[in-house]
Amino acid sequence: MASSTQQDHQAVQPTIDDPLGRDFPEIGAMSKEDLQDMLNDPHFFHAMLIRQPEVKRLVGDHQVAINRNQALAEKNLSLRPKLENLRDQVTASFNQTQKAISQFDDLLKKQADLYQVSTEPYGESASRSRLLTALHESDKLSESIAHQFAVQGLLEEDQFIKEFREERTKYHKRAWVANRWSEGNFRWD
């Protein structure tokens, strides 16, 4: 009867209510001897461990993460040629921009040099010469308009007043600038 009682004792052995028993109920329900055997035999321990639902879930989650990382790595590798092409295009655009900036700076320098040199067509003496020529032409044109009206009678009074006034206004503005310039009181800066 002792053996029957011993079997009943093992069969009715209460489960231990501790964190291990709650987290791993199958291991928590094992007898002390089975637990001792599991600790002494690494193969038995491993076999029991990988059968646990929590471990299976963790292994599954780990495999899903590995698969996801592999998919991302493959996608990144597939994008590599496109990204390298874009990098080359950006580099070429940057180099073109730098070249254009350099050319623009050279043109600005040339323009500044043209304005500074008096022998060039945009220099101070050339500008003064053009102003005096325009002043003389305005004077001649206004005299021609007056001659057409007074002597030849080719212009109506309203047309004469309009054309003569416009040309004499140009003449007086140019004469004022020329006089100020000759006195040294006018600069084109």
Image (cartoon, helix red, strand yellow):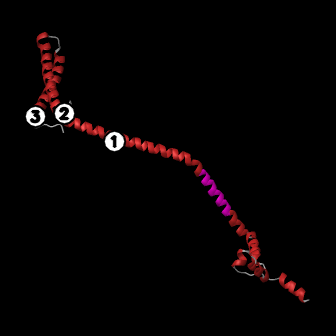
Quarter holding residue 38: bottom right
Q: Which tag, 2 or 1, sits closer to the chain's start?
A: 1
- The residue labelled by disc 2 is 123
Please give the range of residues in magenta.
61-75
Q: Is label 1 in a helix, a strand or a loop?
A: helix
- The residue labelled by disc 3 is 180
Query: Residue at 16% of width from left, 17% of height from top?
Result: 160
Query: Residue at 19% of width from left, 35% of height from top?
Result: 117
Q: Is label 2 in a helix, a strand or a loop?
A: loop
For the residues labelled 1 and 3, say whether their Cβ atoms are less than 8 Å apart: no
Q: Nearer the viewer, residue 12 or 133?
A: 133
- 152 to the left or right of 2: left
Question: Residue 152 at what x, y percent from top left?
Answer: 13, 10
Which amino acid lies under the numbered mark 3 shown in the image of this protein?
A: Arg
Observer-side mark, 2 or 1, equals 1
Quarter holding residue 110: top left
